Amino acid sequence: MALYTVDVFSGSDDSIICDSHAQGVIVKATQGTGYVNPRCNHQWDLAGQLGKLRGLYHYAGGGNPESEAQYFINNIKNYVGQGILILDWESYQNFAWGNTNWARRFVDEVHRLTGVWCVIYVQESALWQVANCANTCGAWVAKYASMNWNSWTLPNMNVSSGVFKFLTGWQYTGGDMDRSIFYLDEAGWKKLANPTGGEVKVESKPAPAPVNNSPETWTDSLGDKWTAESGTFTTNQPINLRWGAKTSSALITTLPAGSEIKYDAYSRHDGFVWLRQPRSNTQYGYLVCRDANTNEPFGTFK
């Protein structure tokens, strides 16, 4: 048996939670040690009122993993045992991306505090980064046929579970909404949320103060703040590459879908998240990679 789910964050419309196809709803709760989804309680309650299975996820910021685990649990402690707990392991805004021990430390701390093992959300190509969690955690793998697969029908494609014995879940589209299939029945979902079936007691531990793990930042001559970050962005649609980080800046070229761009910094301004591409002769190109209001990406990161 399988369950179909959606996952939501602060910018998600309630209609996604209400979609009749979704049997489960996974809500973003926290990120790093300084962000709580302001709509988390509303989204959690709405899903419950509709009789849907629920989950909560923490988006890794890449700071101290024990502190982030404590921050997550301290903010959702009243819900522990009622929904599955998930670590969202992605490259964007994650300063520990590539660290193969970070997730292990995070899930160990969550388990110490709650007795519950997290499911780990990760793109298929990065399963190796969380491989040492395979003996205790489930894998929820992201792999899309395309960003325009706006359907509840599963695409015909293979998805690896890496060293995990099997896939717990597969997120197969991220266009108009994030749709996933979990290879569980309702009892299996509830078992992940509350392994003993009894009252879940959360260890009392004060929330840690936000930890400053920020990399180098600077403000350019136009007043826009930039943050150093190295990565590769692959476009999922045609995107303009410009000589400046403004939609009015001179055009270098239009990148076709599937273009890979190496970047060394990002900035959130004027309604977009911008990336900076190092070029020859100490010059830079700039392109948008995400809608800053909805957080919708225009491609994938690694």
Image (cartoon, grey):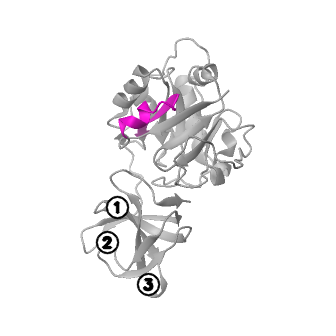
Judge by depth and name the residue closer to the eye, 139 or 200. Answer: 139
CA separation in Å, label 2 and label 3:
22 Å
Q: Position of residue 56 (x, y in %)?
A: 47, 32
- Label 1 SS: strand
Residue for point 55% across, 50% down: 149
Residue assigned mark 3: 282
Location of the N terminus (image quadrant): top right
Q: Which amino acid type corresponds to the residue marked 1 in the rendered image?
A: Phe
| Neighbour tally class for label 1: few under 14, some 14-19, many 20 plus, Cα within 10 Å | many
Residue 70 colored magenta?
A: no
Q: Position of residue 19 (x, y in %)?
A: 45, 33
Mark earlier in primary sequence (3, 1)? 1
- Label 3 SS: helix
- Please give left or right for residue 213 compared with residue 165 in the image: left
Q: Which amino acid type corresponds to the residue marked 3 in the rendered image?
A: Thr
Judge by depth and name the residue closer to the eye, 19 or 137. Answer: 19
User: What residue range appears in magenta?
Assistant: 13-30
Asked if labels 2 and 1 touch by Cβ distance under 8 angstroms, the answer is yes
Decide: is 266 above or below 179: below
CA separation in Å, label 3 and label 1:
24 Å
| Neighbour tally class for label 2: few under 14, some 14-19, many 20 plus, Cα within 10 Å | some
Residue assigned mark 1: 272
Q: Position of residue 143 (x, y in %)?
A: 61, 50
